[in-house]
Image (tube, rainbow, N blue to C red):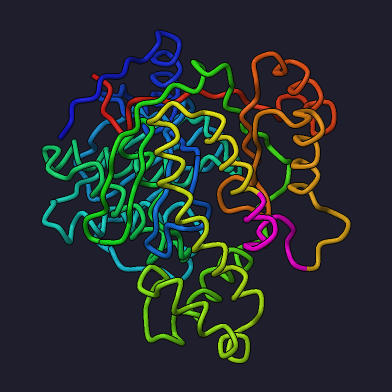
Amino acid sequence: MKTQKLALTQTQKQQLDAGFTAAFGTAPTRYFSAPGRTEIGGNHTDHQRGRVLAAAVNLDTLAAVRPNETCVIRIQSQGYPLCTVDLTELTPQPAEINTTPALIRGVAARFTQVGCAVGGFDAYVESTVLPGSGLSSSAAFEVLVGTIINHLFFAGKVSQPEIAQIGQYAENVFFGKPCGLMDQTASAVGGLVTIDFLDKENPRIRSVDFDFSACGHALCIIDTQASHADLTDEYAAITRELKSICAHFGKEVLTQVSQEDFMAALPALRESCSDRAVMRAMHFYRENARVPQQVAALEQGDFPEFLRLVRESGYSSYMYLQNVIPAGYKQQQDVAVSLALCEHYLNGQGAFRVHGGGFAGTVQAFVPFALLETFRTGIDGVLGEGACHVLSIRAQGGVEII
């Protein structure tokens, strides 16, 4: 496993130690971290085993940890009730669907399946990856728990990409969300990476060496202030509708269906599937082809072309994938308003797009330094103070802090 060094600040260590002691009455012995992620390219391509461009960011989930010599995992996240999971029961629990215990139980169950003798531990967790921020707080948490178990009980035998797969398993099977693998992989591996998920057991991961700030642009994530609550079916509908397209061809995912065959079958697909499913599939083919073009633009130093592709991606998500405005929403259209604000304040410069799952959460923007203060002030003035976050890419993925 690649060695990744990360240090706690004195303030972070003091806060983690104090929180752990307050929760468990003793001192922690080890520390762990997993970052949030930002999707740079490949909007809703991962669950079709397509390509993505993603990066770990400098917001993370930190844990102070101590083995407790029992068969119970206890995790106290700052501001939340104590979460307790009994390791003698490692099957999906219907009552835990969409809850944190489901993620913990699912990660522990998968480690047990690969031969790890998972034991109990106590953890106190603090996070700057806020829930609903669009930076994948759930993936960071899954990677954090997986990294803790891997180091405490398995001598680090599981690779970071495998920890990502374990997190996805927990979210799919125990938590009940049919997510792809991009979020967990970006968090687990770290840095700026392009990932091809065609081989689901062995996704191809390659680092991309690029510094956005060297091109005079800031990477911004805008909190649209929209809630993910009650939107689970909106996300699930995307994969469900794409599955209906795949079923026409007797395939599992769209990467197994050529674009030529898809286009030739459009009359029949419009009869057997919804037009929205057809439009979403059109987005997939275009977006999946766009990712290697974005990577090539970055590696060749052609930043204007990269920005053009980002804008094109945002257009495709809005127009074809249709993951900006939830079905039937008229009064609240937070993501759409946020995109309109980006267009206004960027005034033809930089680039912006819906970020991640869509419907709620965040918008991503590449903002020229000369416009950054005006842009941030304008966004915060409408959406609220602190809505615009300026981020940087973090080199480390899920890691034990030595």
Q: Position of residue 144 (x, y in %)?
A: 35, 39
Q: Residue at x 74, y 42 (%)?
A: 339
Give the magenta-colored segment's residue range: 315-327
In percent of width and height, residue 391 lies at 54, 24
* Residue at image point 59% right, 71% down: 237
387 or 307, which is in the foreground? 307
Residue closest to the eye, 248 or 144: 248
On the rendered structure, is 338 left or right of 143? right
Image side of residue 350 versus residue 338, left or right: left
Q: Is the residue 340 above or below the residue 390 in the image?
A: below
Q: Could you tell me residue 145's position as x and y percent?
A: 33, 43
Q: Position of residue 20 (x, y in %)?
A: 39, 26
Membership of 224 in magenta stretch: no
Q: How many marks?
A: 0
316 to the left or right of 128: right
- At 41% from the left edge and 42% from the top edge, which residue is drawn? 141
Figure quadrant of the C terminus: top left
